[in-house]
Image: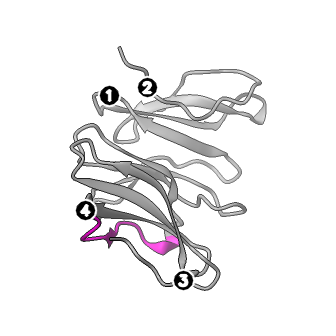
Amino acid sequence: MIRSRPYGGDYNSPQFSPDGSRFVYVRANSPLSSPPLKHALFVVKSNGSGSHRLTPWSLDAGDNPDWSPDGKLIVFRSNSSENAPQSQIYVVAPDGSGLRQLTHAEIGTTVLSYSFSPDGSSITFAQTGVAGQPDIFVMNADGTNIQPVTHTKLWDSAPDWGSG
């Protein structure tokens, strides 16, 4: 069972692995925890045992992490807190190894939600596009070949893949 001391923080955005054996969650520290008001990703077995931190607190990781379809990677956004430094999209293995930054957005670029494609070969995400509003983009799962999908003056975010 996942527990913390009173007023230690919150557990947010749980997502089960494709095989249901584990889930990833975001630990949001309270002002009374160390480090205060920071976020990190954790993975735990489905029965609540074996919780371990995947990301350093310095990344301030969060924003609804998503599993790759094969369960080998978790995609997430850094600096997910309000008024945080520039956000980027990263992936990490569920054992905490292979932490890798995928995007290299310039300061002031809004980087938002993301999702793995059903075959795991691509990631769709939102970032600043036309007229300073978020547009939808797609990239290879290794962060290469970023391509815009939408070009609109309207706010486009929270992309996800539909079923075929």
Q: Which mark is residue 47?
A: 4
Instruction: Give the CA distance from mark 4 to mark 1.
Output: 26 Å
Instruction: Give the CA distance from mark 3 to mark 2.
Output: 38 Å
Element under disc 1: loop
Question: Residue 73: image x %, image y %?
Answer: 29, 49
What residue do we see at 72% from left, 28% from top? 130
Instruction: Give the CA distance from mark 2 to mark 1.
Output: 7 Å
The answer to whether mark 4 and mark 3 are in CB contact below 8 A is no
Q: Nearer the viewer, residue 134 or 25?
A: 25
Q: Amino acid at mark 3?
A: Pro
Rendered position, 129 above or below 78: above
Give the label, 3 or 2, closer to the camera: 3
In the image, is 80 to the left or to the right of 65? right
Question: Residue 34: image x %, image y %?
Answer: 54, 85
What residue do we see at 35% from left, 14% from top? 164
Element under disc 3: loop
The answer to whether mark 2 and mark 1 are in CB contact below 8 A is yes
Q: Amino acid at mark 4?
A: Asn
What residue do we see at 29% from left, 66% from top? 48
Residue 111 seen in the figure: yes
Instruction: Give the CA distance from mark 1 to mark 3.
Output: 39 Å
